[in-house]
Image (spheres, helix red, strand yellow):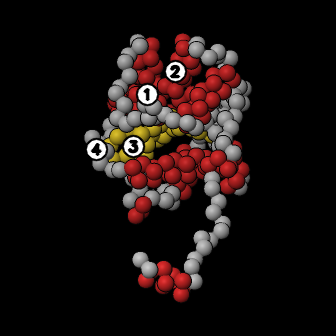
Amino acid sequence: MDVYEAVTTRRAVRKFTDRPIPKAVLERVLSAAIWAPSGSNIQPWNIYVLTGAPLAELKKRAGKRVTAHDPWDEREYQMYPADMETPYRERRSRFGHERYSALGIADGDWEASQRAASANWDCFGAPAALFCYIDRDLGRPQWSDVGMYLQTVMLLLRGEGLHSCTQMAWSVYRKTVAEILSPPEGQMLFCGMSIGYEDVTEPYIRSGRAPLDETVTFIDTAPQRLPQKALADSLLAV
């Protein structure tokens, strides 16, 4: 699989088979992902990978919280601005409509939407999960570095025939995750990532993307420069 195919076939898969992933494959992916870029090469990501019994225990504990209607843990960061503006508000709304329409869930059916969202806590059936932490005292540029690392991981997973789904949703069950992982106090959970082989029986609508001219501006004409004499004259006239 070349890099263009990896980029265009990567998507958030929300149903996986229980086919196990060889540890050697995960090690190969994560060994290559360390070459992701970061400012001054500080590599601000802290990664934990769960499989087998530890992952099953996390799913069990998270499932109990869902069943008990346990309140969410307070988020340690804001996922979206309170007043999201155009065009981002419309893009987010369109995604939600497409996501739940594929599952046969009507707009406004809150209970059905919540049932579908609860699959997060089972990692959508995936046999492996990655959790990404960042030190609390790092800034926005380092969060950007983390994003580049996670994208690198996801593209490498595609190269292995695997799919993934990043899940900031785990931030509201961060205390349950910490019970299993015991991260240092200075680290904050950014997101989880479900990893596995796609269950192709799950219906979905592939989210579209904005046209190129909506997000990219090409500037291919050099700005005009005054001749040197004209420039000198203009400076003298000031």
Which residue type does callout 4 highlight?
Gly
Tell us which disc is closer to us: 2 or 1.
2
**Which callout, 4 or 3, points at the residue further toward the start of the chain?**
3
Question: Is 76 displayed left or right of 86 in the figure?
Answer: left
Between the C-alphas of marks 2 and 1, the distance is: 14 Å
Residue at mark 4 to residue at mark 3: CA–CA distance: 10 Å
Location of mark 3 (residue): 133
Q: Is residue 114 above or below residue 98?
A: above
Q: Residue at x 37, y 36 (%)?
A: 77
Mark 4 or 1 closer to N-term?
Answer: 1
Looking at the rendered image, the quarter that the C terminus falls into is bottom left
Q: Residues within 10 Å of mark 2 (few under 14, many from 20)?
A: some
SS label for mark 1: helix
Q: Amino acid at mark 1?
A: Leu
Q: Residues within 10 Å of mark 1 (few under 14, many from 20)?
A: many
Identify which amino acid the numbered label 3 is placed on.
Answer: Tyr
Query: Left or right: where does residue 76 sit relative to residue 14?
Result: left
Residue placed under numbered mark 4 in the picture: 186
Determine whether the residue tagged by mark 4 lies in a helix, strand or loop: loop
Q: Which residue is mark 1?
A: 58
Indicate the position of residue 158 as horizontal and vertical percent values.
65, 46
Between discs 2 and 1, the one toward the N terminus: 1
Position of residue 57 measured from the top left corner of the image (x, y, whole percent): 43, 26
* Residue positioned most to the bottom: 229
Callout in the foreground (3, 1): 3
